[in-house]
Image (spheres, rainbow, N blue to C red):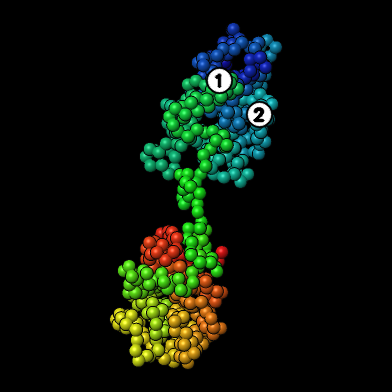
Amino acid sequence: MATDWLGSIVSINCGDSLGVYQGRVSAVDQVSQTISLTRPFHNGVKCLVPEVTFRAGDITELKILEIPSPGDSQHFGDLHQTELGPSGAGYQVGINQNGTGKLVKKPASSCSAPQNIPKRTDVKSQDVAVSPQQQQCSKSYVDRHMESLGQSKSFRRRHNSWSSSSRHPNQATPKKSGLKNGQMKNKDDECFGDDIEEIPDTDFDFEGNLALFDKAAVFEEIDTYERRSGTRSRGIPNERPTRYRHDENILESEPIVYRRITVPHNVSKEFCTDSGLVVPSVSYELHKKLLSVAEKHGLTLERRLEMTGVCASQMALTLLGGPNRLNPKNVHQRPTVALLCGPHVKGAQGISCGRHLANHDVQVILFLPNFVKMLESITNELSLFSKTQGQQVSSLKDLPTSPVDLVINCLDCPENAFLWDQPWYKAAVAWANQNRAPVLSIDPPVHEVEQGIDAKWSLALGLPLPLGERAGRVYLCDIGIPQQVFQEVGISYHSPFGCKFVIPLHSA
Protein backbone atom coordinates (compact mmCIF):
# COMPACT_ATOMS: atom_id res chain seq x y z
CA MET A 1 0.00 0.00 0.00
CA ALA A 2 2.80 2.46 0.89
CA THR A 3 4.65 1.81 -2.34
CA ASP A 4 1.63 3.03 -4.33
CA TRP A 5 2.45 6.59 -3.33
CA LEU A 6 6.08 6.58 -4.39
CA GLY A 7 6.78 9.31 -6.92
CA SER A 8 3.92 11.50 -5.70
CA ILE A 9 4.57 15.15 -5.05
CA VAL A 10 3.58 16.10 -1.53
CA SER A 11 3.68 19.12 0.78
CA ILE A 12 4.57 18.47 4.44
CA ASN A 13 3.91 21.07 7.13
CA CYS A 14 6.11 20.52 10.20
CA GLY A 15 4.87 23.47 12.19
CA ASP A 16 6.33 26.90 12.80
CA SER A 17 9.69 25.57 13.97
CA LEU A 18 10.57 23.42 10.92
CA GLY A 19 8.38 25.03 8.25
CA VAL A 20 6.87 23.53 5.11
CA TYR A 21 8.68 21.08 2.81
CA GLN A 22 7.71 20.02 -0.69
CA GLY A 23 9.16 17.25 -2.78
CA ARG A 24 8.69 13.88 -4.44
CA VAL A 25 8.15 10.83 -2.25
CA SER A 26 11.16 8.56 -2.61
CA ALA A 27 10.62 6.17 0.32
CA VAL A 28 7.96 5.28 2.93
CA ASP A 29 8.95 3.11 5.91
CA GLN A 30 5.95 1.82 7.85
CA VAL A 31 8.13 0.20 10.47
CA SER A 32 10.05 3.31 11.49
CA GLN A 33 7.16 5.62 10.59
CA THR A 34 9.24 7.84 8.26
CA ILE A 35 8.77 9.36 4.82
CA SER A 36 11.59 10.62 2.54
CA LEU A 37 11.40 13.36 -0.10
CA THR A 38 13.84 13.76 -2.96
CA ARG A 39 14.86 17.14 -4.41
CA PRO A 40 13.05 18.93 -1.56
CA PHE A 41 12.05 22.58 -1.25
CA HIS A 42 11.97 24.28 2.15
CA ASN A 43 9.56 27.23 2.40
CA GLY A 44 9.73 27.70 -1.37
CA VAL A 45 13.58 27.57 -1.53
CA LYS A 46 15.41 24.56 -2.92
CA CYS A 47 17.32 22.66 -0.27
CA LEU A 48 21.02 22.02 -0.63
CA VAL A 49 20.64 18.33 0.29
CA PRO A 50 19.21 15.90 -2.27
CA GLU A 51 16.90 14.08 0.17
CA VAL A 52 15.08 14.82 3.43
CA THR A 53 13.47 12.24 5.82
CA PHE A 54 10.63 13.10 8.20
CA ARG A 55 9.26 11.26 11.23
CA ALA A 56 5.54 10.91 11.68
CA GLY A 57 5.66 12.79 14.97
CA ASP A 58 7.10 15.89 13.27
CA ILE A 59 4.43 16.07 10.59
CA THR A 60 1.54 18.38 11.35
CA GLU A 61 -0.12 18.41 7.93
CA LEU A 62 0.46 16.46 4.73
CA LYS A 63 -0.88 17.34 1.29
CA ILE A 64 -0.62 15.25 -1.84
CA LEU A 65 -0.14 17.69 -4.69
CA GLU A 66 0.27 15.28 -7.63
CA ILE A 67 -0.05 11.54 -8.13
CA PRO A 68 1.68 10.08 -11.18
CA SER A 69 -0.31 8.03 -13.65
CA PRO A 70 0.36 4.29 -13.82
CA GLY A 71 3.69 3.74 -15.55
CA ASP A 72 4.36 7.42 -15.69
CA SER A 73 7.38 8.74 -13.74
CA GLN A 74 7.20 12.53 -13.95
CA HIS A 75 10.20 14.58 -12.87
CA PHE A 76 9.95 17.19 -10.14
CA GLY A 77 8.56 20.32 -11.86
CA ASP A 78 6.78 23.50 -10.98
CA LEU A 79 5.53 22.78 -7.48
CA HIS A 80 3.79 26.08 -6.97
CA GLN A 81 1.81 25.82 -10.17
CA THR A 82 0.91 22.20 -9.37
CA GLU A 83 -0.35 23.27 -5.97
CA LEU A 84 -2.72 25.67 -7.66
CA GLY A 85 -4.11 22.92 -9.86
CA PRO A 86 -7.58 21.45 -9.28
CA SER A 87 -6.34 17.89 -8.87
CA GLY A 88 -7.02 17.80 -5.18
CA ALA A 89 -10.48 16.26 -5.28
CA GLY A 90 -10.69 12.59 -4.32
CA TYR A 91 -8.67 11.68 -1.22
CA GLN A 92 -7.97 13.38 2.06
CA VAL A 93 -4.97 12.55 4.24
CA GLY A 94 -5.48 12.51 7.97
CA ILE A 95 -2.78 12.22 10.61
CA ASN A 96 -3.45 9.86 13.50
CA GLN A 97 -2.14 10.38 16.97
CA ASN A 98 0.53 7.76 16.48
CA GLY A 99 1.79 9.66 13.38
CA THR A 100 0.54 7.26 10.72
CA GLY A 101 -1.25 8.66 7.73
CA LYS A 102 -4.60 7.37 6.59
CA LEU A 103 -6.36 7.99 3.30
CA VAL A 104 -10.04 8.75 3.57
CA LYS A 105 -11.89 8.51 0.28
CA LYS A 106 -14.44 11.17 -0.49
CA PRO A 107 -17.59 10.47 -2.40
CA ALA A 108 -16.71 10.05 -6.05
CA SER A 109 -18.22 12.42 -8.54
CA SER A 110 -18.68 12.16 -12.25
CA CYS A 111 -16.35 14.00 -14.56
CA SER A 112 -19.24 15.41 -16.50
CA ALA A 113 -21.04 16.75 -13.44
CA PRO A 114 -20.34 20.33 -12.39
CA GLN A 115 -17.91 20.59 -9.51
CA ASN A 116 -16.73 23.45 -7.35
CA ILE A 117 -13.06 24.12 -8.03
CA PRO A 118 -11.43 25.25 -4.78
CA LYS A 119 -9.43 28.46 -4.78
CA ARG A 120 -5.86 28.70 -3.55
CA THR A 121 -7.00 29.41 -0.02
CA ASP A 122 -9.42 26.49 -0.16
CA VAL A 123 -6.70 24.10 -1.26
CA LYS A 124 -4.40 25.09 1.57
CA SER A 125 -7.16 24.90 4.15
CA GLN A 126 -7.75 21.19 3.58
CA ASP A 127 -5.65 18.11 2.97
CA VAL A 128 -6.46 16.78 -0.49
CA ALA A 129 -5.04 13.99 -2.63
CA VAL A 130 -6.08 12.75 -6.05
CA SER A 131 -6.23 9.17 -7.16
CA PRO A 132 -4.59 8.19 -10.45
CA GLN A 133 -7.98 7.27 -11.86
CA GLN A 134 -9.43 10.72 -11.24
CA GLN A 135 -6.45 12.83 -12.33
CA GLN A 136 -7.29 12.72 -16.04
CA CYS A 137 -10.92 13.43 -15.27
CA SER A 138 -9.99 16.49 -13.21
CA LYS A 139 -7.77 17.88 -15.94
CA SER A 140 -10.45 17.54 -18.58
CA TYR A 141 -12.94 19.17 -16.26
CA VAL A 142 -10.62 22.13 -15.69
CA ASP A 143 -10.39 22.70 -19.43
CA ARG A 144 -14.15 22.65 -19.83
CA HIS A 145 -14.69 24.83 -16.80
CA MET A 146 -12.18 27.50 -17.88
CA GLU A 147 -13.61 27.54 -21.37
CA SER A 148 -17.10 27.95 -19.96
CA LEU A 149 -15.87 30.94 -17.96
CA GLY A 150 -14.77 32.63 -21.18
CA GLN A 151 -11.03 32.41 -20.51
CA SER A 152 -8.61 33.03 -23.37
CA LYS A 153 -6.81 30.29 -25.21
CA SER A 154 -3.52 31.53 -23.80
CA PHE A 155 -4.41 29.94 -20.43
CA ARG A 156 -4.85 26.53 -22.06
CA ARG A 157 -1.57 26.95 -23.91
CA ARG A 158 0.17 27.72 -20.62
CA HIS A 159 -1.57 24.78 -18.98
CA ASN A 160 -0.44 22.43 -21.76
CA SER A 161 3.11 23.76 -21.67
CA TRP A 162 3.17 23.12 -17.89
CA SER A 163 1.95 19.60 -18.44
CA SER A 164 4.61 18.94 -21.08
CA SER A 165 7.36 20.43 -18.89
CA SER A 166 6.42 18.20 -15.98
CA ARG A 167 6.75 14.98 -17.97
CA HIS A 168 9.51 12.50 -17.39
CA PRO A 169 12.48 12.77 -19.77
CA ASN A 170 11.85 9.23 -21.02
CA GLN A 171 8.23 9.96 -21.81
CA ALA A 172 7.36 10.94 -25.36
CA THR A 173 6.32 14.54 -25.70
CA PRO A 174 3.32 15.16 -27.96
CA LYS A 175 4.11 17.37 -30.92
CA LYS A 176 2.48 20.79 -30.70
CA SER A 177 0.37 22.00 -33.56
CA GLY A 178 2.04 24.48 -35.83
CA LEU A 179 5.60 23.28 -35.09
CA LYS A 180 7.80 22.02 -37.90
CA ASN A 181 9.36 18.58 -37.13
CA GLY A 182 9.28 19.41 -33.41
CA GLN A 183 12.39 21.56 -33.75
CA MET A 184 10.91 24.65 -32.13
CA LYS A 185 11.34 24.51 -28.37
CA ASN A 186 8.88 25.73 -25.88
CA LYS A 187 9.62 29.31 -24.86
CA ASP A 188 8.83 28.61 -21.25
CA ASP A 189 11.31 25.71 -21.17
CA GLU A 190 14.01 27.90 -22.68
CA CYS A 191 13.45 30.58 -20.06
CA PHE A 192 12.60 28.61 -16.92
CA GLY A 193 13.70 25.04 -17.71
CA ASP A 194 17.22 25.24 -16.23
CA ASP A 195 17.55 23.90 -12.72
CA ILE A 196 18.77 26.25 -10.01
CA GLU A 197 21.73 24.58 -8.38
CA GLU A 198 22.03 26.79 -5.34
CA ILE A 199 19.86 29.55 -3.94
CA PRO A 200 21.04 31.34 -0.80
CA ASP A 201 18.49 31.21 1.99
CA THR A 202 19.69 34.45 3.59
CA ASP A 203 18.70 37.97 2.53
CA PHE A 204 21.28 40.44 1.26
CA ASP A 205 22.42 42.84 3.97
CA PHE A 206 22.03 46.22 2.30
CA GLU A 207 22.67 48.28 5.42
CA GLY A 208 25.82 46.37 6.28
CA ASN A 209 27.27 46.73 2.80
CA LEU A 210 26.34 50.42 2.66
CA ALA A 211 28.20 51.00 5.92
CA LEU A 212 31.37 49.70 4.26
CA PHE A 213 31.30 52.61 1.76
CA ASP A 214 32.96 55.78 3.06
CA LYS A 215 31.71 58.59 0.80
CA ALA A 216 33.84 61.27 2.41
CA ALA A 217 37.04 59.30 1.82
CA VAL A 218 36.13 58.56 -1.80
CA PHE A 219 35.29 62.18 -2.61
CA GLU A 220 38.51 63.35 -0.96
CA GLU A 221 40.45 60.92 -3.12
CA ILE A 222 38.71 62.20 -6.26
CA ASP A 223 39.45 65.81 -5.34
CA THR A 224 43.11 65.00 -4.71
CA TYR A 225 43.39 63.27 -8.08
CA GLU A 226 41.75 66.18 -9.91
CA ARG A 227 44.05 68.73 -8.27
CA ARG A 228 47.13 66.71 -9.16
CA SER A 229 46.07 65.99 -12.74
CA GLY A 230 45.06 69.59 -13.41
CA THR A 231 41.44 68.82 -14.22
CA ARG A 232 38.71 71.14 -13.02
CA SER A 233 37.61 70.28 -9.51
CA ARG A 234 34.02 69.74 -8.60
CA GLY A 235 34.25 72.60 -6.14
CA ILE A 236 31.42 74.57 -4.66
CA PRO A 237 29.30 77.10 -6.60
CA ASN A 238 31.47 80.00 -5.41
CA GLU A 239 34.62 78.35 -6.80
CA ARG A 240 33.29 77.69 -10.30
CA PRO A 241 35.04 79.72 -13.00
CA THR A 242 33.10 82.35 -14.88
CA ARG A 243 31.53 81.16 -18.12
CA TYR A 244 31.82 83.34 -21.19
CA ARG A 245 29.78 83.62 -24.34
CA HIS A 246 31.31 83.01 -27.76
CA ASP A 247 31.51 86.77 -28.42
CA GLU A 248 33.11 87.70 -25.08
CA ASN A 249 36.82 88.16 -24.45
CA ILE A 250 38.18 85.69 -21.90
CA LEU A 251 41.40 87.66 -21.42
CA GLU A 252 41.54 90.64 -19.11
CA SER A 253 42.00 93.87 -21.07
CA GLU A 254 41.97 97.58 -20.48
CA PRO A 255 38.66 99.34 -19.89
CA ILE A 256 36.73 100.03 -23.10
CA VAL A 257 36.92 103.61 -24.37
CA TYR A 258 33.64 104.40 -26.09
CA ARG A 259 34.62 107.84 -27.36
CA ARG A 260 37.35 107.15 -29.92
CA ILE A 261 36.46 109.85 -32.45
CA THR A 262 36.81 113.54 -31.68
CA VAL A 263 36.28 116.49 -34.02
CA PRO A 264 37.83 119.98 -33.80
CA HIS A 265 34.53 121.86 -33.55
CA ASN A 266 31.48 121.78 -31.39
CA VAL A 267 29.30 118.75 -32.15
CA SER A 268 25.65 119.51 -32.77
CA LYS A 269 24.59 115.85 -32.79
CA GLU A 270 26.11 112.53 -31.78
CA PHE A 271 25.37 108.97 -32.78
CA CYS A 272 26.38 105.62 -31.31
CA THR A 273 26.89 102.15 -32.76
CA ASP A 274 25.38 98.86 -31.61
CA SER A 275 28.46 98.22 -29.46
CA GLY A 276 28.16 101.63 -27.79
CA LEU A 277 30.94 103.53 -29.61
CA VAL A 278 30.22 107.25 -29.98
CA VAL A 279 30.31 108.66 -33.53
CA PRO A 280 30.08 112.47 -33.65
CA SER A 281 28.56 114.31 -36.60
CA VAL A 282 30.57 116.78 -38.70
CA SER A 283 29.60 119.89 -40.58
CA TYR A 284 29.22 119.87 -44.34
CA GLU A 285 32.33 122.09 -44.74
CA LEU A 286 34.51 119.70 -42.66
CA HIS A 287 33.13 116.71 -44.55
CA LYS A 288 33.92 118.37 -47.89
CA LYS A 289 37.45 119.20 -46.70
CA LEU A 290 37.96 115.59 -45.62
CA LEU A 291 37.03 114.27 -49.09
CA SER A 292 39.29 116.79 -50.85
CA VAL A 293 42.31 115.83 -48.69
CA ALA A 294 41.59 112.15 -49.35
CA GLU A 295 41.46 112.82 -53.09
CA LYS A 296 44.81 114.65 -52.87
CA HIS A 297 46.36 111.51 -51.32
CA GLY A 298 45.01 109.24 -54.07
CA LEU A 299 41.43 108.44 -53.07
CA THR A 300 40.04 109.78 -56.34
CA LEU A 301 36.41 110.44 -57.16
CA GLU A 302 36.18 107.27 -59.24
CA ARG A 303 37.33 105.19 -56.28
CA ARG A 304 34.83 106.86 -53.97
CA LEU A 305 32.01 106.35 -56.48
CA GLU A 306 32.82 102.66 -56.80
CA MET A 307 33.08 102.16 -53.05
CA THR A 308 29.86 104.05 -52.43
CA GLY A 309 28.06 102.09 -55.14
CA VAL A 310 29.16 98.74 -53.70
CA CYS A 311 28.18 99.58 -50.11
CA ALA A 312 24.88 101.20 -51.09
CA SER A 313 23.91 98.28 -53.35
CA GLN A 314 24.78 95.78 -50.58
CA MET A 315 22.53 97.66 -48.18
CA ALA A 316 19.76 97.85 -50.78
CA LEU A 317 19.99 94.08 -51.44
CA THR A 318 19.59 93.46 -47.72
CA LEU A 319 16.54 95.74 -47.56
CA LEU A 320 15.02 93.92 -50.53
CA GLY A 321 15.09 90.59 -48.71
CA GLY A 322 18.62 89.33 -49.14
CA PRO A 323 18.97 85.58 -49.84
CA ASN A 324 15.29 84.93 -49.08
CA ARG A 325 14.26 87.09 -52.03
CA LEU A 326 17.21 86.86 -54.41
CA ASN A 327 17.72 83.20 -55.25
CA PRO A 328 17.22 81.09 -58.39
CA LYS A 329 13.87 79.74 -57.12
CA ASN A 330 12.34 83.24 -57.06
CA VAL A 331 13.05 84.34 -60.64
CA HIS A 332 9.37 85.27 -61.02
CA GLN A 333 9.67 87.69 -58.06
CA ARG A 334 12.49 89.93 -59.22
CA PRO A 335 12.49 93.10 -57.09
CA THR A 336 12.03 96.46 -58.79
CA VAL A 337 14.05 99.52 -57.73
CA ALA A 338 13.39 103.08 -58.91
CA LEU A 339 16.57 105.20 -58.88
CA LEU A 340 16.11 109.01 -58.83
CA CYS A 341 19.35 110.84 -59.69
CA GLY A 342 20.27 114.50 -60.25
CA PRO A 343 23.01 115.98 -62.53
CA HIS A 344 25.73 116.10 -59.84
CA VAL A 345 28.23 113.88 -58.00
CA LYS A 346 25.56 112.48 -55.70
CA GLY A 347 23.62 111.43 -58.80
CA ALA A 348 26.76 109.64 -60.07
CA GLN A 349 26.87 107.72 -56.77
CA GLY A 350 23.29 106.59 -57.37
CA ILE A 351 24.09 105.45 -60.94
CA SER A 352 27.00 103.38 -59.60
CA CYS A 353 24.66 101.77 -57.07
CA GLY A 354 22.11 101.00 -59.81
CA ARG A 355 24.78 99.30 -61.93
CA HIS A 356 25.68 96.91 -59.08
CA LEU A 357 22.01 96.20 -58.36
CA ALA A 358 21.38 95.36 -62.03
CA ASN A 359 24.35 92.99 -61.94
CA HIS A 360 22.60 91.15 -59.08
CA ASP A 361 19.48 90.49 -61.15
CA VAL A 362 17.46 93.42 -59.78
CA GLN A 363 15.15 95.26 -62.15
CA VAL A 364 16.46 98.87 -62.02
CA ILE A 365 14.68 101.90 -63.51
CA LEU A 366 17.00 104.93 -63.56
CA PHE A 367 15.50 108.43 -63.80
CA LEU A 368 17.92 111.18 -64.89
CA PRO A 369 16.68 114.42 -66.53
CA ASN A 370 18.19 115.54 -69.83
CA PHE A 371 20.86 118.22 -69.65
CA VAL A 372 22.94 119.75 -72.40
CA LYS A 373 26.16 119.27 -70.51
CA MET A 374 26.83 116.46 -68.01
CA LEU A 375 29.66 115.93 -65.56
CA GLU A 376 32.38 113.57 -66.65
CA SER A 377 31.72 111.29 -63.68
CA ILE A 378 28.05 111.00 -64.66
CA THR A 379 28.95 110.30 -68.29
CA ASN A 380 31.31 107.50 -67.28
CA GLU A 381 28.79 105.91 -64.91
CA LEU A 382 26.02 106.09 -67.53
CA SER A 383 28.27 104.38 -70.05
CA LEU A 384 28.76 101.45 -67.67
CA PHE A 385 25.09 101.37 -66.65
CA SER A 386 24.00 101.11 -70.30
CA LYS A 387 25.82 97.75 -70.54
CA THR A 388 23.48 96.23 -67.95
CA GLN A 389 19.83 95.20 -68.18
CA GLY A 390 18.78 98.34 -66.33
CA GLN A 391 16.35 100.83 -67.90
CA GLN A 392 17.08 104.57 -68.13
CA VAL A 393 14.26 107.13 -68.45
CA SER A 394 14.30 110.93 -68.57
CA SER A 395 10.57 111.54 -68.16
CA LEU A 396 8.53 110.89 -65.05
CA LYS A 397 5.76 109.47 -67.24
CA ASP A 398 7.97 106.45 -67.90
CA LEU A 399 8.25 105.59 -64.20
CA PRO A 400 6.00 102.79 -62.88
CA THR A 401 2.55 103.79 -61.72
CA SER A 402 2.34 100.83 -59.33
CA PRO A 403 4.41 100.70 -56.14
CA VAL A 404 7.96 99.45 -56.51
CA ASP A 405 10.00 97.55 -53.93
CA LEU A 406 12.44 100.35 -53.17
CA VAL A 407 13.11 103.98 -54.15
CA ILE A 408 16.71 105.24 -53.99
CA ASN A 409 16.95 109.02 -53.70
CA CYS A 410 20.02 110.82 -55.09
CA LEU A 411 18.34 114.08 -56.12
CA ASP A 412 19.55 116.45 -53.39
CA CYS A 413 22.86 118.25 -53.32
CA PRO A 414 23.65 121.40 -51.24
CA GLU A 415 25.82 122.82 -54.01
CA ASN A 416 22.93 122.69 -56.49
CA ALA A 417 20.16 124.17 -54.42
CA PHE A 418 18.68 125.90 -57.48
CA LEU A 419 17.49 122.49 -58.70
CA TRP A 420 14.89 122.36 -55.92
CA ASP A 421 12.82 124.91 -57.83
CA GLN A 422 12.86 122.98 -61.12
CA PRO A 423 9.56 121.42 -62.30
CA TRP A 424 11.12 118.00 -62.85
CA TYR A 425 12.49 118.00 -59.27
CA LYS A 426 9.08 118.81 -57.77
CA ALA A 427 7.44 116.19 -59.98
CA ALA A 428 10.00 113.54 -58.92
CA VAL A 429 9.43 114.36 -55.25
CA ALA A 430 5.66 114.10 -55.71
CA TRP A 431 5.98 110.73 -57.50
CA ALA A 432 8.20 109.30 -54.76
CA ASN A 433 5.84 110.40 -51.99
CA GLN A 434 2.81 108.95 -53.84
CA ASN A 435 4.42 105.60 -54.75
CA ARG A 436 4.20 104.34 -51.16
CA ALA A 437 7.52 102.52 -51.51
CA PRO A 438 10.23 102.80 -48.82
CA VAL A 439 12.96 105.31 -49.63
CA LEU A 440 16.72 104.97 -49.20
CA SER A 441 18.72 108.23 -49.44
CA ILE A 442 22.43 108.04 -50.34
CA ASP A 443 24.63 110.74 -48.79
CA PRO A 444 21.71 113.10 -48.05
CA PRO A 445 22.35 116.73 -47.09
CA VAL A 446 20.82 118.54 -44.16
CA HIS A 447 17.49 119.69 -45.60
CA GLU A 448 16.80 123.40 -45.44
CA VAL A 449 13.48 123.27 -47.30
CA GLU A 450 10.19 121.70 -46.35
CA GLN A 451 9.58 120.16 -49.75
CA GLY A 452 11.53 116.94 -50.14
CA ILE A 453 11.39 113.16 -49.96
CA ASP A 454 10.99 111.65 -46.51
CA ALA A 455 13.42 108.73 -46.29
CA LYS A 456 13.10 105.58 -44.23
CA TRP A 457 16.87 104.95 -44.31
CA SER A 458 19.83 107.19 -45.04
CA LEU A 459 23.41 106.17 -45.84
CA ALA A 460 26.17 108.57 -44.72
CA LEU A 461 29.74 108.39 -46.08
CA GLY A 462 32.80 108.40 -43.79
CA LEU A 463 31.28 110.47 -40.98
CA PRO A 464 27.62 111.48 -40.66
CA LEU A 465 26.16 114.92 -41.04
CA PRO A 466 23.78 116.21 -38.33
CA LEU A 467 20.76 114.67 -40.06
CA GLY A 468 17.25 115.30 -38.78
CA GLU A 469 14.13 113.19 -38.41
CA ARG A 470 13.35 113.28 -42.13
CA ALA A 471 16.48 111.20 -42.83
CA GLY A 472 14.98 108.19 -41.09
CA ARG A 473 17.35 105.61 -39.66
CA VAL A 474 20.97 106.54 -40.33
CA TYR A 475 23.61 104.08 -41.52
CA LEU A 476 27.33 104.78 -41.90
CA CYS A 477 29.43 103.59 -44.85
CA ASP A 478 33.20 103.07 -44.92
CA ILE A 479 34.55 104.49 -48.19
CA GLY A 480 38.20 103.72 -47.42
CA ILE A 481 39.54 107.01 -46.01
CA PRO A 482 42.89 106.33 -44.24
CA GLN A 483 43.34 107.26 -40.57
CA GLN A 484 46.10 109.81 -41.26
CA VAL A 485 43.76 111.70 -43.58
CA PHE A 486 41.40 112.19 -40.64
CA GLN A 487 44.29 113.39 -38.50
CA GLU A 488 45.35 115.85 -41.19
CA VAL A 489 42.00 117.64 -40.99
CA GLY A 490 42.08 117.64 -37.17
CA ILE A 491 39.90 114.56 -36.48
CA SER A 492 41.12 111.97 -33.98
CA TYR A 493 39.75 108.83 -35.59
CA HIS A 494 39.49 105.17 -34.68
CA SER A 495 37.42 102.99 -37.01
CA PRO A 496 34.00 102.04 -35.54
CA PHE A 497 33.17 99.57 -38.35
CA GLY A 498 34.79 96.44 -36.97
CA CYS A 499 34.24 93.59 -39.45
CA LYS A 500 31.58 95.41 -41.50
CA PHE A 501 31.52 98.15 -44.12
CA VAL A 502 28.02 99.41 -43.30
CA ILE A 503 26.84 99.80 -39.68
CA PRO A 504 23.68 101.27 -38.17
CA LEU A 505 23.80 104.42 -36.05
CA HIS A 506 21.51 105.41 -33.22
CA SER A 507 20.82 108.85 -31.86
CA ALA A 508 22.78 109.36 -28.66
Residue located 52% across and 21% down the image: 199
Residue 448 is situated, as x and y percent measured from the top left of the image, at: 53, 81
The foreground one among 425 and 321 is 425
Q: In the rendered structure, which amino acid carries the disc numbered 2?
A: Val
Residue 15 is situated, as x and y percent measured from the top left of the image, at: 67, 16
The vertical placement of 199 against 484, above or below, is above
Tag 1 secondary structure: loop
Q: In the rendered structure, which amino acid carries the disc numbered 1?
A: Leu
Residue located 57% across and 15% down the image: 2
Q: Indicate the quadrant where residue 326 lies.
A: bottom left
Which dot marks residue 123? Answer: 2
In the picture of the structure, the residue carrying the numbered disc 1 is: 212
The quadrant of the picture occupied by the N terminus is top right
Q: How many marks?
A: 2
Does residue 332 show up?
A: no
Q: Are marks 1 and 2 in contact (CB under 8 Å)?
A: no
Q: Indicate the quadrant where residue 410 lies.
A: bottom left
